[in-house]
Each structure stands twice: as C-alpha cells, then as structure tokens.
Amino acid sequence: MHFLLSALAFVASATSQTAPLCRPICDVPSQYAYSNGTADDAPAINFALSLCARGGVVRFAEGVDYSVLTPVSATNLTNVTIEMKGNLHLPQNITYMQTIFNQSGLSNLYWFTFSGPGIQYVGSSNVSAGWIYSYGQAWWDANIYPGTGLSGRPHLMSFTTTNGSMQYYKSRKPIAWNVQLSGTNITVSDTFIDAFSTTGSFPFNTDGFDVTGKDITITNSVIYNGDDAIAVQSGSSNILFEHGTIGYQSHGMSIGSLGQNQAQYATVSNVTFNDVTVINAVYASRFKSWEGGQGLAKNITWSNIRAYNVTFPIFVTQTYINQGSSQTQIGNGATSGRPNNATVNMQDFRWVNFTGTINTFRPGDGSCVTDPCWYNVGLPNLTHTEAIIVECNTNTSCVNFEMTGIEIIPQSLDAPTVICLNATAALNSDLGFDCSNGTFVPTYARASLIYH
C-alpha cells in the first residue's frame, strides 16, 4: 500500500509541476527511510525515467537516500535532465547481485544504463549528497588470491548520449568499472570517484572512465581507483582530459587497450591529457596495444603532468596482455597463441613538461597475481629508476615521438633511466634522447654538455 501511495504521489508530482519552458518534472519517491533500506526504489526510478523520457526533469531529492536493489535502464531518453541530488545505495549482498548478473545473460551488466540524445546528469555540489554507494569494499575483500576479482561483478553505469553532459558525478566504492562513456559532444566535470581500498585488498577493474566517442571533455575531476583513471578506446577522437587529480593504485591515463580483436582495425586520434596530478599510481602516461593487433593511434599528447611516487611514469607497450581475463574493456579476442603479424601503429605522440618522482622503494600496487608480476613481464633487471619505457613492436611502428621537459627523479636519487626499443632516430628525430637502455640523458642536456 505504501508503494502505491508513493507512486500516486509521484504521478501527481510529474503531471502537476511545471518548469521554465514547461518541462515535465518527475520527483522520485523514496522508501528507504521507512524500510530501513530494504525496499527497492528501482521501479519508481524506472517509472520516472519513462514518464519524463521526452524533455523532462527526473529529480532525486537533495540528501534523500534511495535503495536501488535492481538495475535501472532507460534507453529511450531525449533531452532529459537527471538531477542526482540524493544518495543511491546498491545492494550489499554479493550473492544476490551475482544472481542478477548471471540471470541477465549479459557479458557486461551495468546497474545504471542511460542512453539517448541530450542527457544532462547533474549531481550535487554538496559534498555529502549526490553519491552512488556501491559497497565494493566487500567484493574486493572477498577476492581470493590469485584471483583478479570475483565473477559476476556488475559495472556501475553506461552513459551514452550526444550533446550531453555529466556534472558532480560521485561514486563511492564501485564494484567494478564506473562509467562507460560513449557518444558525441559530451562534457564531464567535477567528478569524484573513490575506489580506494581501506583494508589492503585490491580494487580490481575499478576504471574511472572508459571512453568511446568523439568530442568529449572530462575536466576538474578527482579519481582514486585500482585501474585506468581514463582509458580511451578504439573509435575515439577529439578527447580532452584535464585539470584533474588521479592515483592511489591507479593505472593512469591510458590509450587502449587497442587491437585485442585482430579482425578489427583500431583507431584513436586527437587526444590530450593536460594539467593532471598523479599520486601513488602504477602508471601516469600509458599506451597499450595487443601483439598482433592492427590499427593506428595518432596525435596523442600528455602535457603538464605531475607524477608523485609513480612506478612507471611514462610507459608504452605494443605487446600488451591482460592478466586473468579474456576481455579488455568492451573488446573480445584471443589472448594467447596470437601471431605477431601486425601492430597498432603510433604516430605523433608527445610528452611535454612531465615532472615528479619514481616509486623506487615500494613499486607496484598490490594487483600482482603472477610471477613475474604482470606489469614486469618482458622487463628484466628493473631498477625502478625507469622514468621512460618505450617498447615499440617493430622499428617502424612508432613515428614522430617527442619528449620535452621530462624531469622525473627516482626516490633513491639515482640517475633516472630509460628502456627503449625500436623508436628509431630516423622516424623520431624529436624523441629527446637516444633510444637505448641506460641512463636518461635528454638531448638538450647532452648538447649543453658538449657546448661547455
């Protein structure tokens, strides 16, 4: 009876209120307080999204709690504003969520799915409101070594739109991926993602943003997580990620992985990462493509990056593997027995004004379940003084690399070093150092020594 009364009140709200330009407003009722979080508000949320699916405003009241015990899906939205001022709580029963995942028949289940043109997701500027609580810590703690996360993990959100935006998205302890962001002309700002583990167990696959689209800007964001803070995937162009702070077991700002499906040609172009602070991460700047993949990544820049206590500040590999999984982001393909007969080529890559310190004394992040550790595979005799690692698959697969203003210092205060393969001088005249393994001596410094 209470749910019926709530639904009737909700319909009255949706039909009686008006906003500027006569936009319909749907206020979502909450059963959280009276049920102590045991009643499911997902039906009311789905109803609100369907009732206001055309040009409406769906409102979650400021500071009010909602239990979202089943997935929410709205795939036919048009010019809808989602005012996420309340706090959403996912189920805390792992087995229950795994059952929903398994019954879905999907390889990737998202707890929230929003798609359609003109979606505006507006959270709260109030630090205590607008959160999505996923209770992922219990999932991370339940993982048993050498596992890389429990099976049946739902991801948090799929957000697909054109001419849309996301502001004040706040996520606390996500179970797995945060946002699969897809579409065209999207602006994301003022994000806060907290996937920091407080027990020492690793928060596997808690990506911040996995991006597939065009003309997308992500700015003024804080992302603490256990995988890529941002991973720009195949089919993306004109992507800007700037004015952010990332870290705490993060795998940094990544292109890829690309080329897992050897039958598809991967493309990424015109991507800029600018003015970002990276703290305690495994990587800061990262490119990853699969051995035997094919495609082209072009015009990629990392500029004004501050890396503190980072294991591998600048890392490029064209022979990527994914430990413990046959998937990477949204791509499928064989992970073993792959012929090395093609490469995702890299062209016009720049690293400009890259400063900070290398994690010499306690490298890594706690995600290692293999021997050698997955992030050390193919890198024998590491000293963890490596400021730059560039592994080009062939002597023609890396073209027009440029590194300037690289000032990255090992915590041991030893000389910074580099590992470099196949970035030939003929194709990379502005690389900034000799492509060989050893001490990092920038070309301009060498020229200065010669001059003096």
Image (cartoon, rainbow, N blue to C red):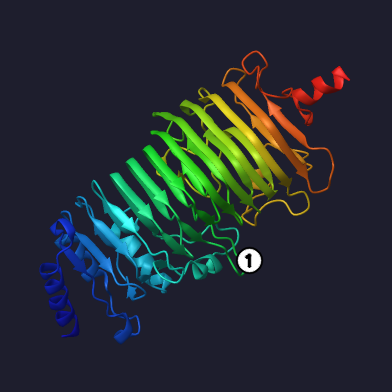
Image coords of residue 344 (percent x, y): 50, 27
Q: Nearer the viewer, residue 134 or 201?
A: 134
Q: Residue at x 61, y 34 (%)?
A: 316
Residue 32 versus residue 178 in the image, above or below: below
Image coords of residue 187 (percent x, y): 38, 46
The image quarter in which residue 386 lies = top right
Q: Nearer the viewer, residue 68 or 109?
A: 68
Which quadrant of the rendered structure holds the N terminus? bottom left
Residue 251 versus residue 176 in the image, above or below: above
Q: Residue at x 10, y 68 (%)?
A: 15
Give the structural element (helix, strand or loop) at label 1: loop
Q: Amino acid at mark 1?
A: Gly
Residue 226 versus residue 233 in the image, above or below: below
Q: Nearer the viewer, residue 274 or 342?
A: 274
Farthest residue, direction front: 20
Find disc 1 in the rendering and name its residue.
Answer: 200
Which quadrant of the rendered structure holds the C terminus? top right
Examine the rendering and report whether any part of residue 384 can be seen: no
Left or right: 305 as drawn, with respect to 153: right
Q: Residue at x 11, y 70 (%)?
A: 16
Image coords of residue 221 (percent x, y): 49, 53
Image coords of residue 398 (percent x, y): 58, 22
Left or right: 439 as drawn, with respect to 355: right
Q: Residue at x 56, y 21 (%)?
A: 397
Examine the rendering and report whether any part of residue 277 can be seen: yes
